[in-house]
Structure formats: structure tokens, C-alpha cells
Image (cartoon, rainbow, N blue to C red):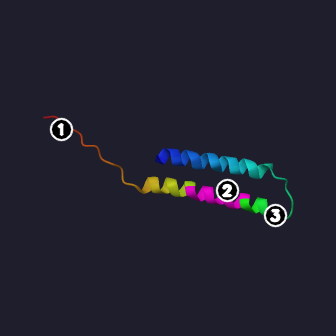
Amino acid sequence: MEKKRRIIIAVLLLLSIGNFSRLTNNDNIRPIQFISIFVIGALTALLIANYSRRLQRPATLVAMPMLA
């Protein structure tokens, strides 16, 4: 489930970056450009939080049978 969530967030981030790069460049920022920038920031924050949560979890130890 966690892996699917990361993949979905990454795909949405790529789509939002592609949509933003498709917009024409002006000196002033239109509302749709502001929303695109906000969504890119929010998705990036979610992705970073997801990876940092994954790195903070302690590694699970697997019990190895002792050879006698």
C-alpha cells in the first residue's frame, strides 16, 4: 500500500510539472499558474515526508536460526 501511494504521488507530481511547463511564460502570475505552483509544492512535500517517514522507521530484524 505504501509503495502504491509513493507511485501515485510521483505520477501526480510529474503531471503537474508537465502542466506547469506547458503554460506560457509572462511577467505576471495568473491564478492557474499559482495553483500549479502550489500543487507542485504540496506534492513534493508529501513525497519528501513519505520518504523521510520510511527512513526513520527502524529496520526490522529477522531472527536467524542458530546452527548448533
Q: Residues within 10 Å of mark 2 (few under 14, many from 20)?
A: some
| Mark 1 residue element | loop
Magenta stretch, main secondary structure class: helix
What residue does disc 3 label? 29
Identify the magenta region: 36-46
Q: Nearer the viewer, residue 53 or 34?
A: 34
How many angstroms separate mark 3 from mark 1 (CA)? Answer: 65 Å
| Mark 2 residue element | helix
Q: Nearer the viewer, residue 64 or 10?
A: 10
Question: Residue 50 appears at what percent x and percent y?
Answer: 51, 54
Furthest-right residue in view? 26
How many angstroms separate mark 3 from mark 2 (CA)? Answer: 15 Å
Q: Are marks 3 and 1 in contact (CB under 8 Å)?
A: no
Query: Any magenta on residue 5?
Result: no
Label ID, residue 66: 1
Pick the quarter of the image with the C terminus: top left
Residue beneath the point at 51% across and 44% down: 4
